[in-house]
Image (cartoon, rainbow, N blue to C red):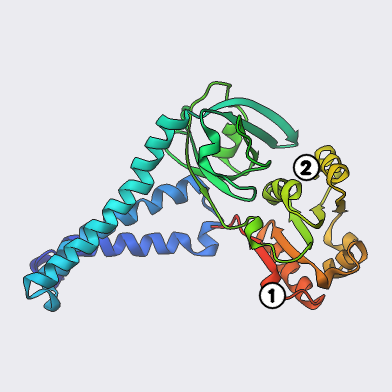
């Protein structure tokens, strides 16, 4: 305790260390499952405070900072990082908001607890968004304006609108369903590499479950080649975009299948997939869904002979 209270900058450094340890603790899988995304998001903002608190301690007690050049370099690294954080987390979203003026145009029910959100704005083509990517959306409405949540495009980007599909998984996503047309939206993005740029084969399987079907819906409409989409669900009413997917399949000559039922009803996932896609090993796979389902799918695909570098997985887990 003598070191903490009497050495230079140690009190602040101790507080910063405790904040970092606390952030790490709530990021553990067991703890993360019990936290809403919004709580997790706010707690992680404390890492910025932790870094600021510990910075002075490094200079005051660090033996490597005896000369001014080393100290100046350390300042430059931290200030450079602060500038990048300020640009990408604050300045750029503000500039995008001023340029594109995104707002809610429509909230459309899709399935129990699922809605599609249509956003309009100006110069949307300049965002250069691609099917499969996501944005962090910050809705300027009571209770929603202080957190930027990630949502995937559920249709190819259009010059006049962007569509996102949201499932009720917590307080924030549930409140999105009640948004009114005209609500302003700040957006960060587009982000993500889960796009057509990954494609190397002409035969492609899109495999999704739950809200993980959203980026696959956009890819299904745009990927070239022979594309098959398989949607996994426990109940028929949980299937999303059924009519849309059938219409897209007819237009492009693709295939749409549903695997509906519990694990015991569906049986081994690999066996079920091979029934639907006999030449499964020759396919490239885009995979998105709940963590347990995705892990089972990766194992099944590997057993079926799909090469590891041909399995592209998008995760919604934090």
Residue 40 spot, x, y in % from top left: 46, 51
Quadrant assignment, res 166: top right
The one of 217 and 54 positioned closer to us in this rendering: 217
Which image quadrant is residue 267 in?
bottom right
Residue in the image at 85% along x and 46% along y: 249
Residue 108 x/y as whole percent = 70, 29
Residue, disc 2: 240
Q: Is residue 24 left or right of residue 120?
A: left
- SS at badge 2: loop
Height in image: 146 above or below 207? Answer: above
Note whether residue 2 is visible: no
Q: Residue at x 35, y 42 (%)?
A: 90
**Left or right placement of residue 101 versus residue 152 in this view:** left
The disc placed on residue 46 is: none
The residue lying at 7 percent from left, 70 percent from top is 68
In the picture of the structure, the residue carrying the numbered disc 1 is 308
Q: Is residue 216 above or below residue 22?
A: above
The total number of labels drawn is 2
Q: Is residue 259 above or below residue 157?
A: below
| N-term-proximal mark, 1 vs 2 | 2
Choose mark 1 or mark 2, whichever is in front. Answer: 1
Q: Quadrant of residue 201?
A: bottom right
- Check the picture and name the quadrant holding the N terminus: bottom left
Structural crowding at the residue carrying mark 2, measured as other residues with C-alpha within 10 Å and reported as few (<14), some (14–19) or many (≥20):
many
Q: Considering depth in this image, is 30 or 236 the residue closer to the camera?
A: 236
Q: Position of residue 76 (x, y in %)?
A: 19, 62
In screen coordinates, is 166 left or right of 281?
left
Mark 1 crowdedness (10 Å alpha carbons): few <14, some 14-19, many ≥20 = few
How far apart are the two marked residues, 1 and 2, measured between alpha carbons? 28 Å
């Amino acid at each position: 305790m003598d070191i903490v209270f009497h050495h230079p900058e140690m009190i602040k450094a101790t507080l910063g260390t405790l904040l970092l340890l606390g952030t790490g603790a709530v990021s553990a899988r067991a703890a993360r499952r019990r936290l809403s995304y919004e709580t997790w998001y706010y707690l992680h903002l404390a890492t910025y405070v932790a870094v600021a608190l510990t910075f002075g301690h490094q200079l005051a007690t660090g033996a490597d900072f005896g000369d001014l050049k080393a100290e100046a370099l350390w300042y430059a690294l931290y200030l450079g990082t602060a500038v990048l954080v300020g640009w990408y987390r604050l300045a750029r979203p503000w500039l995008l908001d001023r340029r594109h003026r995104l707002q809610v145009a429509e909230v459309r029910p899709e399935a129990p607890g699922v809605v599609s959100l249509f956003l309009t704005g100006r110069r949307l083509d300049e965002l250069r968004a691609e099917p499969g990517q996501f944005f962090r959306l910050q809705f300027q409405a009571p209770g929603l304006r202080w957190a930027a949540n990630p949502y995937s495009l559920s249709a190819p980007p259009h010059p006049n609108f962007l569509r996102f599909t949201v499932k009720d998984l917590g307080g924030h996503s549930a409140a999105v369903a009640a948004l009114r047309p005209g609500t302003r939206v700040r957006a960060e993005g587009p982000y993500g590499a889960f796009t057509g740029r990954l494609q190397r084969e002409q035969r492609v399987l899109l495999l999704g479950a739950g809200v993980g079907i959203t980026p696959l819906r956009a890819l299904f409409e745009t990927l070239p080649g022979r594309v098959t989409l398989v949607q996994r669900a426990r109940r028929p009413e949980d299937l999303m975009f059924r009519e849309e997917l059938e219409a897209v399949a007819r237009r492009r000559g693709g295939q749409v299948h549903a695997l509906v039922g519990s694990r015991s009803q569906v049986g081994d996932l690999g066996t079920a997939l091979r029934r639907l896609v006999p030449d499964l090993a020759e396919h490239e796979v885009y995979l998105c869904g709940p963590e347990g389902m995705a892990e089972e799918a990766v194992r099944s695909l590997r057993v079926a002979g799909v090469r590891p570098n041909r399995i592209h997985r998008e995760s919604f887990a934090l």
